[in-house]
Structures are given as structure tokens and as C-alpha cells.
Image (cartoon, rainbow, N blue to C red):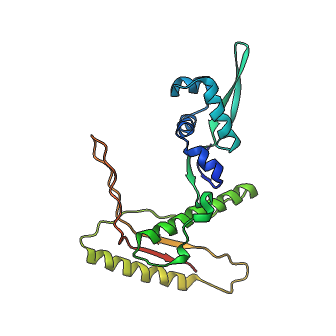
Amino acid sequence: MLDVTVIEDSAAAAASLDPVRARLLAELAGGPASATMLAARVGLPRQKVNYHLRALEAHGLVELAGERRKGNVTERLMQATAASYVISPLALAAVQPDPGRFRDQLSARWLLAVAARLVRDVGTLITGAAKARKRLATYALDGEVRFASAADRAAFVEELTRGVSALIAKYHDAGAEGGREHRIVVALHPTVKEPAPGPRSAPESAPESAPAIEQAP
């Protein structure tokens, strides 16, 4: 089972978003189970669970983990193909975000478009690497910083932009024979606060002015 996989097919995305099938995927991410076992957990007839499992299996979201005999019946034990799933913008190819339509580094919506492209591109690379049975060379840096003021945040963005741009200029070689282009994405946005214990509350959303920086050699 993979830690995470990217769903690129629209039909598979629709199957994963069905509430019953999403619940079955969550159950099967915890380990193999038969339709009978799942029926008892989710409170549905075994025949209905089997119907949903067949749909999930057809889209590659669950797979056969083994079989076992129970009386005169052979039960199929199914498991999720991944512990979690991400839906690629390719599943909505006609309306997927396109950062190239506009470029506003202080727009949260442009940041979202850049992030969506990141999911799409990395998902495509993972799929290709898996088919070729090759490792995919990637890197990610994740951290948090608390600014004392908006002025400090602006200064940080300016310094970060200069630093990343200098690194790109230093290492970018447009004429390198056999070289391979890489995309660099640097993003900055307010941290989403977790809801406090007790009554459910919606997480805070990032303001429209969240800064974002993107650089590509």
C-alpha cells in the first residue's frame, strides 16, 4: 500500500467522493477486510458493500489482498491501494486552474492555481516513474515563521525573492547538454488554525493578500 496516490481520472475521482465509498476506503486503509466485515462496520447489507467495492476496484482504488474460506464460501479480502488519496486537477481537465492566465504574487487565488499545478505535475511524474520503475528526484521544505509585523513579513518576502533568484541565476545553465529543467515553487501563507476542542468550528481561511513567490528556471 502506498502512503498517498494521485487520482487523475474523473470517474475514479467521482467514485472516491461518494460518501459510502469514501468510508469504505477509509476502513480498508486500516487493513484488509471482506465485504461481510465491512458491512458490519458501516451498517449496510453485504450485497450493497460488494457493489461499491467492485466499483472501487474497477478504478484501481482497492485491490485484492487475499482470500479465505468461511464455511462453503470463499471471501475476498480487499485493501485500499493507498493510505490517502489526492485528486489531481487533471480529473477536471477542462476547468483546471492555469497560473499562466495571470500572475499576481500577492493573490491567494494565484497561489492556489500554482499549488494545483504542483499537484497535477507531481502526480503525473509519480505515475510515469512508477510505470518506468524509476525513482523520482524531488525535494520539499516545510516550515513556519511568526512575523512580528506586516513590515517584517514584507521584508522577509523581499529577501527570500532576492535569495532564490540569486540561486537560480547561479545554477541555471540553459545550454547544459543533457541537463533537465526543474520547477521551483516557494509559497508563503498564514497558518490555518485548528478548531478548538468542543463545538465544531470552521478553520480560518487565508486572507486574499497571502504572498506567494514562484520561480522557474
Residue sitting farthest toward the front: 94
Residue sitting farthest toward the right: 132
Q: Is residue 105 left or right of residue 87?
A: left
Q: Is residue 144 left or right of residue 141?
A: left
Query: Quick check: 105 above or below 65?
Result: below
Residue at point 71% right, 60% down? 128
Residue at point 43% right, 80% down? 161
Residue at point 68% right, 87% down? 175
Residue 139 makes an appearance in the image: no
Residue sitting farthest toward the top: 71
| Image spot of residue 152 (x, y percent) | 28, 76
Q: How many marks?
A: 0
The image quadrant of residue 80 is top right
Along the line of sight, the residue nearer the viewer: 139 or 68 = 68
Q: Is residue 81 left or right of residue 111?
A: right
| Image spot of residue 11 (x, y percent) | 65, 49
The image quadrant of residue 217 is bottom right
Residue 116 makes an appearance in the image: yes
Along the line of sight, the residue nearer the viewer: 216 or 95 = 95
Query: Quick check: 52 above or below 88?
Result: above
Q: Quadrant of the N terminus?
A: top right
| Image spot of residue 173 (x, y percent) | 63, 85
Query: Quick check: 1 above or below 203?
Result: above
Query: Quick check: 157 above or below 131?
Result: below
Along the line of sight, the residue nearer the viewer: 102 or 153 = 102
Q: Is residue 173 left or right of residue 214?
A: right
| Image spot of residue 174 (x, y percent) | 65, 85
